[in-house]
Amino acid sequence: MKNKISFNNNKKAFSFFLIFLISTTFMFSQNKKVKIYLVGDSTMCLYDDSRFPQEGWGMPFVNFFDDTVDIENHAKGGRSTKSFIDENRWQPILDSLQVGDYVLIQFGHNDAANSKNHPNRYTSPEDYKKYLGKYINEAKAKQANPILISPVTRMKFDKKGKVLESHAPYLKAVTEVAKEYQVPFIDLDTKSRELLEKLGPTFSRYLYMYFEPGELPRYPNGYKDNTHFNEFGARKMAELVLQGIIEQNLELANHVVKPYFKK
């Protein structure tokens, strides 16, 4: 009789523990935030106030999502698919990845920069594809979700006012990799060129760190950078990335902030 009572008590205790475990797991999963890691170069990265008004598009990007999303911007200026790995910037991200996390990957500017001063940056289009494959395979192995993004355009117009392609071999390469590995792809290169063509040569400069003498106290003699963005340009590029997420109906689109209506 005692053994029967003991068995019943143990059964009840186990059932209670099982219910508690399931409930706790469910509550934890409900409270777990969606994690997004940004991996890329200077057009995406963070800048402090000393560089104002320069911003990477990853800075305003964080404001497009509700409080269920946590974004870590690990992009770094001057890095390529190769040097980001060589400098051990990718491994800590990989070690932190959990099931369901997202990794937005955008390189190309520095992969194409075959500079004597920075020999570690250059990556041929073929090697660029191999490195992108490495990011994708390793992220997928952690059951995370890689998203490829083509390098954003530089402000270069021909005499007819048409935007010149800045990264043609790398755009082709990243497009092929996205198809091969069947991962989402946001063609920021093409989207940004289309935006510049709408604005034209005169007004496109207002997206970039491009100032005439006397326009900005920090640059009294002017500043002409056709690659990096001011705060307005960074936001416009971030909007194009968000547009790509929504167009492809990615799960991340469910976490975009809801429209604000004044009561």
Image (cartoon, rainbow, N blue to C red):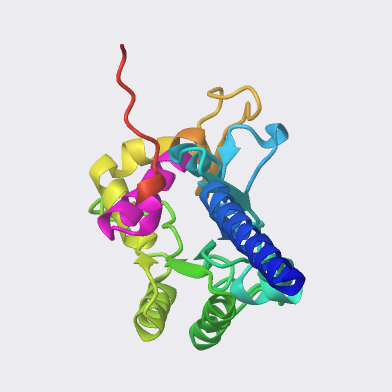
36 vs 134, nearest the viewer:
36
Examine the structure image and report whether residue 249 is included in the region drawn in magenta.
yes
Residue 147 seen: yes
Is 52 drawn above or below residue 57 in the view shown?
above
**Quarter holding residue 163:** bottom left
Tell me where the magenta segment starts and ends, as one range.
233-253
Q: Is residue 126 left or right of residue 54?
A: left
- Residue located farthest toward the front when viewing the structure as drawn: 1
Q: Which of the image's four quarters has the C terminus? A: top left
Is 50 drawn above or below residue 5 in the view shown?
above
Rendered location of residue 51, percent (x, y): 67, 36
Residue in view at x 57 percent, y 73 percent? 111
Rendered location of residue 147, percent (x, y): 45, 66
**Quarter holding residue 152:** bottom left
Q: Is residue 159 left or right of residue 217?
A: left
257 vs 3, nearest the viewer:
3
Give the dominant element type of the magenta stretch: helix, strand or loop.
helix
Residue in view at x 70 percent, y 66 percent? 5
Is 189 drawn above or below residue 199 in the view shown?
below
Residue in view at x 56 percent, y 22 percent? 214
Residue in view at x 59 percent, y 67 percent? 110
- Residue located farthest toward the top when viewing the structure as drawn: 263
**Quarter holding residue 139:** bottom right
